[in-house]
């Protein structure tokens, strides 16, 4: 693996919230160009915390973060990081704050220094790519759960990031929206880390799944192959298989 | 950020909150009315004694006394010069009067004495307990409700605020002196209000679903025990004695 | 905008407490249990606004948001501000027990005044410029009157406070401008995103 | 089916939010004692709305609600309803409002007129039943996502309801917590309606799954039996099967 391909490197990261026991405890992580990792772990194991640390929203108590081989320590370093790495929040409600969809999607490009026209154009293109054309003037606050997730993804993609951090993008989504999301992630040529509790979803769109436990990520567990057999003995719900 | 002043065990912490509220109330009224210097000094000493008994951590105590004393420092810039009375000395065209200095000194002592008592009260009683105690002392139920809701929503708003700020940060927002910044901040405040409103409504719905009909119950029952009665009598006696000292023209 | 404990004369404290109690009683008349959660939110907003503050003399100048609270709530601004102010006293020692009445009165009375002066602006059929004018004026006006009332309370305590009182009012000018702008911006956002909220509150 | 067994009956319910298109459109529903229904449906199809209408938090524009054969129309009728039917909110953050877990769980029993000691005892018992002993004095808003869900369930169960309405109880939960939930629901002798997007979970703990679409519930679709086969070709995450 060439050194140039290394995007995110975390070394011995420790973190605890004020007055609580440690959440991350000597965590190490490497993400290279083209990698698509899945991350699983019990509730409260610190997955969301990890993403927030990579983005500089939380500061580790010890350990080092390197992004493209540059150490990131102070707020100014992370300003640059945030232009390259896009984070999709666990709760889509947290991500949107402008009154209309168009304004929200254009917000990122404007911050990157694009002109008003360019920003609007990028926003239109991104919405089209996600199949959200026609949503431009909808009020973000009144979108349904699935629509909010997709618009949130649009706001992140509009910044044209090189890496995505996706925090439970499928929770609460219906099967149809999940399929759309799967399609989008497969079409994009991006590296990403995806948190989810749904192993089926992860196996479909990631190259490797890692487990988070006791404040670290386990990279060393052996690969696991097997089959499930589920039975659906009753119910009138139409259930599609591809 | 809005964490209450919490501290370890103290004798004061275990007193009935109603007793504490009553004592602070009468103490404050006396301090607000008193003008005699020796009474004020006694009040200040009493305040210090109580704060010590409440075991308020010193750094925290001083941090909380700063705002009040900044304001008092400001008054010292005016009152000694603007108060009519017997001149003490002059600074240029301005004359400092004896009465002015005394007046400013009285205000300083009063304010600090009252603040010490308030800090001791807050440091030894959780906010929710204070709310229930106020209800017991006759504050109307709806006001107490509003008090509880407000206290809870302060935390809700703060959390929603942190989330919105994070969302702005990760999309490369840097505040500056431009229209984009003003618009963004106004969106943020607006969104904060809307979200908090809806959250408030949903929380209220959840309460209704659990049989809430407008009555407040507390798990902490208040009962006066011997220690409470003794403390109450001691403190009220002290306040009364000082009140008599204040009122009697002699001594 | 608070006056600290120990500064005002007993007469002013008592007068403030009596008038504030009357205002609170007026605000509590026909108050429905159902309205308490939304009032709590405004009360919390009022509390949080006070975190952005600049000390100006014997009062502490910071955002007040009483214009917004008054615009939406009318007389109910009194209980809302009373509760907000008591939490400020308990958690930050902004003001205290004896000043609670005066401080509530100084912030809530201007709120009610602005409610009657500018609530026409919240009607759905108001044009955009008129809406912006009314909401800005409400924020600006409520902060201005509050500043004047704080100055007046000091002046009533003693003439020696006059220069300090004047300075306090003057120092609030930037606060008034910010209050006006913020109130207008918030109201515009609400009108766009949740117009029901404004209409629902508009008491005919 | 005896008439006495009928708990919830909705007839021709229509509903729309102010200024929007109708969400529910002539919906009918019957729930009898012992029934355990699953409810699926795309995002925004009105599942949550339906639950809120049953609890009287939203008022239908037309149609009738009968609970235990008594019509429920005004707020006073629903006060009684809420003592018998427990609703688990989609977002656990909405459900918990007291500072500590114990106070929150005891809140319902106190409202039902229990004495302080009884309420505390019920709260302790409920927490124990859910495996949450020791949580009594934890601060509710500092719990992790999964813990919040379980405590929310405790607050509902403490009211000893006869019916549960569970709105996406599993979203965002890890597999272990899901198993706990499954166990609890199986052990309880209650009727319930459970909304979820996870068909595997629904098949395990409900007797019938219905689909919500276009503002109504489809009871008439035929029952569907089949098998899934999933493959997990990679990943280091430990995945348990029972
Ligand atoms: N703001 C906070 N203050 C204190 N503790 C927190 C805070 N946020 C999270 N925690 C705690 O930190 C731990 C890790 O939380 P985190 O949200 O990172 O978990 P997670 O792995 O994302 O869980 P989930 O699957 O439920 O989303 C949890 O125990 C949680 O209770
Ligand atoms: N307070 C509200 N005001 C206006 N519209 C609303 C409101 N709440 C929900 N809606 C709309 O009503 C529709 C149904 O919403 P509901 O929450 O019942 O859907 P749901 O089936 O529970 O979806 P999900 O699976 O995402 O939870 C959606 O289109 C939603 O946008
Ligand atoms: Mg998480
Ligand atoms: Mg729902």
Image: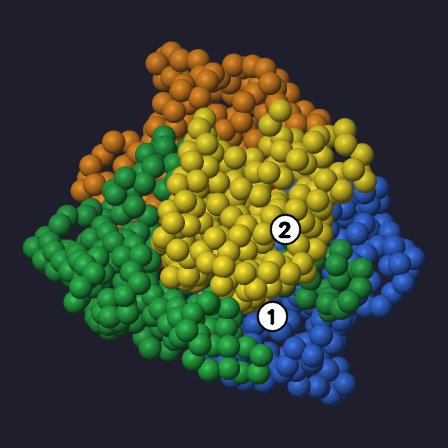
Chain colours: A blue, B green, C yellow, D orange
Q: Which residue is mark 1?
A: A57
Q: Is residue A80 above or below residue B185?
A: below
Q: Residues within 10 Å of mark 2 (few under 14, many from 20)?
A: many
Q: Element at badge 2?
A: helix
Q: Say which chain tag 1 marks.
A: A
Q: Which residue is mark 2?
A: C144
Is there CB contact under 8 Å for labels 1 and 2? Answer: no
Q: Foreground residue, C33 or D73?
A: C33
* Disc 1 CB within 8 Å of nearest ligand 1 atom: no
Name which residue lies at 62% across and 73% down. Answer: A56
On the same chain, marks 1 and 2? The answer is no
In the rendered image, residue D61, in percent from the top left (x then y), is placed at: 60, 18
Q: Quadrant of the N terminus of chain A?
A: bottom right
Which image quadrant is residue B24 in? bottom left
Q: Element at badge 1?
A: loop
Q: Is residue D17 above or below residue C87?
A: above
Q: Say which chain tag 2 marks.
A: C
User: Seen in the image, is A4 located left or right of residue C194?
Assistant: right
In the rendered image, residue C56, in percent from the top left (x then y), is placed at: 56, 66
Q: Is residue B195 above or below residue D64?
A: below
Using the image, tell me which numbered label, if any, was put on residue C116. Answer: none
User: Seen in the image, is A231 located left or right of residue B169?
Assistant: left
């Amino acid at each position: 693996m060439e050194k140039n391909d290394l995007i995110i490197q975390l070394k011995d990261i420790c973190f605890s919230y004020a007055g609580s026991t440690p959440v991350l405890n000597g965590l190490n992580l490497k993400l290279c160009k083209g990698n698509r990792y899945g991350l699983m772990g019990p509730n409260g194991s610190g997955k969301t915390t990890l993403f927030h640390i990579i983005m500089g929203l939380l500061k580790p108590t010890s350990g080092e973060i390197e992004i493209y081989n540059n150490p990131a320590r102070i707020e100014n370093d992370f300003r640059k990081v945030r232009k390259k790495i896009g984070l999709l929040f666990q709760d889509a409600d947290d991500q949107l704050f402008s009154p209309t969809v168009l304004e929200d999607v254009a917000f990122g490009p404007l911050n990157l220094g694009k002109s008003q026209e360019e920003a609007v154009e990028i926003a239109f293109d991104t919405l089209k790519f996600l199949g959200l054309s026609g949503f431009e003037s909808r009020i973000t606050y009144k979108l349904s759960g699935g629509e909010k997730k997709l618009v949130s993804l649009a706001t992140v993609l509009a910044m044209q990031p090189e890496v995505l951090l996706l925090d439970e993008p499928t929770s609460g989504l219906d099967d149809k929206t999940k399929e759309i999301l799967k399609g989008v992630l497969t079409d994009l040529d991006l590296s990403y880390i995806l948190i989810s509790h749904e192993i089926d979803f992860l196996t479909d769109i990631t190259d490797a799944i890692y487990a988070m436990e006791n404040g670290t990520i386990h990279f060393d567990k052996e690969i696991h192959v097997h089959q499930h057999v589920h039975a659906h003995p009753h119910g009138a719900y139409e259930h599609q298989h591809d | 950020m809005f964490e209450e002043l919490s501290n370890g065990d103290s004798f004061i912490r275990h007193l009935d909150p109603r007793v504490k509220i009553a004592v602070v109330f009468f103490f404050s009224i006396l301090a607000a009315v008193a003008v005699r210097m020796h009474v004020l000094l006694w009040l200040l000493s009493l305040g210090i004694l109580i704060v010590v008994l409440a075991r308020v951590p010193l750094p925290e105590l001083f941090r909380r006394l700063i705002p009040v004393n900044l304001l008092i420092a400001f008054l010292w810039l005016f009152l000694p010069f603007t108060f009519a009375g017997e001149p003490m000395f002059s600074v240029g065209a301005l004359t400092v009067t004896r009465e002015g200095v005394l007046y400013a000194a009285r205000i300083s002592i009063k304010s600090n004495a009252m603040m010490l008592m308030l800090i001791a009260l807050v440091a030894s009683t959780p906010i929710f307990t204070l709310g229930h105690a106020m209800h017991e002392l006759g504050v109307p139920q709806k006001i107490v409700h509003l008090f509880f809701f407000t206290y809870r929503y302060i935390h809700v708003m703060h959390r929603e605020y942190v989330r919105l700020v994070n969302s702005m940060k990760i999309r490369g927002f840097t505040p500056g002196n431009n229209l984009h910044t003003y618009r963004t901040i106004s969106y943020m405040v607006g969104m904060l209000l809307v979200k908090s409103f809806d959250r408030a409504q949903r929380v209220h719905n959840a309460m209704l679903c659990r049989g809430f009909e407008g009555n407040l119950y507390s798990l902490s029952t208040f009962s006066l025990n011997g220690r409470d009665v003794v403390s109450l009598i001691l403190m009220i006696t002290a306040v009364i004695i000082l009140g008599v000292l204040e009122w009697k023209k002699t001594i | 905008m608070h006056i600290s404990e120990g500064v005002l004369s007993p007469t002013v404290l008592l007068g403030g407490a009596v008038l504030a109690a009357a205002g609170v009683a007026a605000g509590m008349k026909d108050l429905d249990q159902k309205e308490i959660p939304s009032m709590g939110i405004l009360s919390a907003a009022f509390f949080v606004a006070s975190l952005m503050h600049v000390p100006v003399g014997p009062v502490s100048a910071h955002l007040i948001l009483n214009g917004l609270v008054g615009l939406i709530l009318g007389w109910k601004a009194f209980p809302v501000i009373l509760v907000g102010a008591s939490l400020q006293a308990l958690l930050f020692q902004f003001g205290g027990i004896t000043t609670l009445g005066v401080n509530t009165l100084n912030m809530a009375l201007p709120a009610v005044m602005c409610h009657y002066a500018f609530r026409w602006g919240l009607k759905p059929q108001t044009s955009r410029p008129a809406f912006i004018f009314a909401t800005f004026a409400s924020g600006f006006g409520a902060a201005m009157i509050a500043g004047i009332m704080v100055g007046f309370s000091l002046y009533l305590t003693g003439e020696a406070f006059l220069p300090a009182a004047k300075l306090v009012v003057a120092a609030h000018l930037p606060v008034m401008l910010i209050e006006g702008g913020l109130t207008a911006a918030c109201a515009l956002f609400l009108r766009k995103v949740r117009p029901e909220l404004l209409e629902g509150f508009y008491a005919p």
